[in-house]
Amino acid sequence: HRGVFVGQERIESVDIKVAEIEGGSQITLTGEGLGVVIGHRGETLDALQYLVSLAANAGVSGYYRVVLNTGDFRQKREQTLIALAKRMSEQAIRSGKCRTLEPMNPYERRIIHTTVQSIDGVISTSFGEGSGRRVVIAPEGKEPRPRNDYRKGGSGRGRNDRRSGRKEAYKPEINPDRTPVKDA
């Protein structure tokens, strides 16, 4: 195949192979410089897969599954997520505290949940909505809850910003015009 444009970058010598899988097709891209197709944590690859899936399912009854892969990214990402689930499960067991993971797409969350199910002493659940949905791993017997700052959508840093090294002093709100509230 000739060059392919991804954004404003042209990728030369891309080989596209299509293989039948259960319920659909797997499209594998091979060539040099395909890192731009993967993007950060596979976000670009997921977006392209979604667009290809929309095109493949336009005007079709039922669902035709499309998997887009390059450089065995999907398999490598799965192994990374399995290792993450095991590590966070061990931390939850040792500390007795819940572990909240970064937001993930449904496919990645499913890998985490499946891995956690095979580990004794921990459970997992998902919280949040849309692209902010994340997995929480908790010790068995403890209610799996995300950290408070994640529920509010905060950065998780609180008053002490570790990145800049600054510590903000606590300043209570003072309003001299405030009048006491009278009970009825």
Image (cartoon, rainbow, N blue to C red):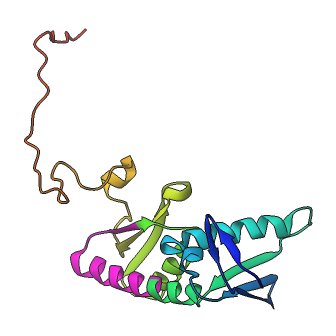
Q: Is residue 60 above or below residue 26?
A: above
Q: Residue at coordinates 14% horizontally, 9% vertically from top-left? A: 177
Query: What secondary structure prevails in the magenta region?
Result: helix
Across and down, in percent, residue 90 comes to 30, 84
Q: Residue at coordinates 58% horizontally, 81% vertically from top-left? A: 34
Residue 49 or 89: which is nearer the viewer? 49
Across and down, in percent, residue 58 comes to 87, 62
Residue 154 or 139: which is nearer the viewer? 154
Q: Give the image quarter of residue 43.
A: bottom right
Q: Is residue 40 above or below residue 70?
A: above
Which quadrant is home to the C terminus? top left
Q: Is residue 167 left or right of residue 37?
A: left
Magenta-highlighted residues: 81-101
Residue 109 or 67: which is nearer the viewer? 67
What residue occupies the far left of the structure in this picture? 169
Magenta run includes residue 86: yes
Q: Residue at coordinates 52% horizontally, 85% vertically from top-left? A: 78
Q: Is residue 39 left or right of residue 80?
A: right
Across and down, in percent, residue 124 comes to 44, 72
Across and down, in percent, residue 122 comes to 38, 79
- Count of labels in the image: 0
Q: Is residue 36 above or below residue 173?
A: below
Residue 90 or 153: which is nearer the viewer? 153
Q: Give the image quarter of residue 1.
A: bottom right
Q: Give the image quarter of residue 156.
A: bottom left
Q: Residue at coordinates 62% horizontally, 85% vertically from top-left? A: 70
Q: Is residue 53 left or right of residue 168?
A: right
Magenta run includes residue 20: no
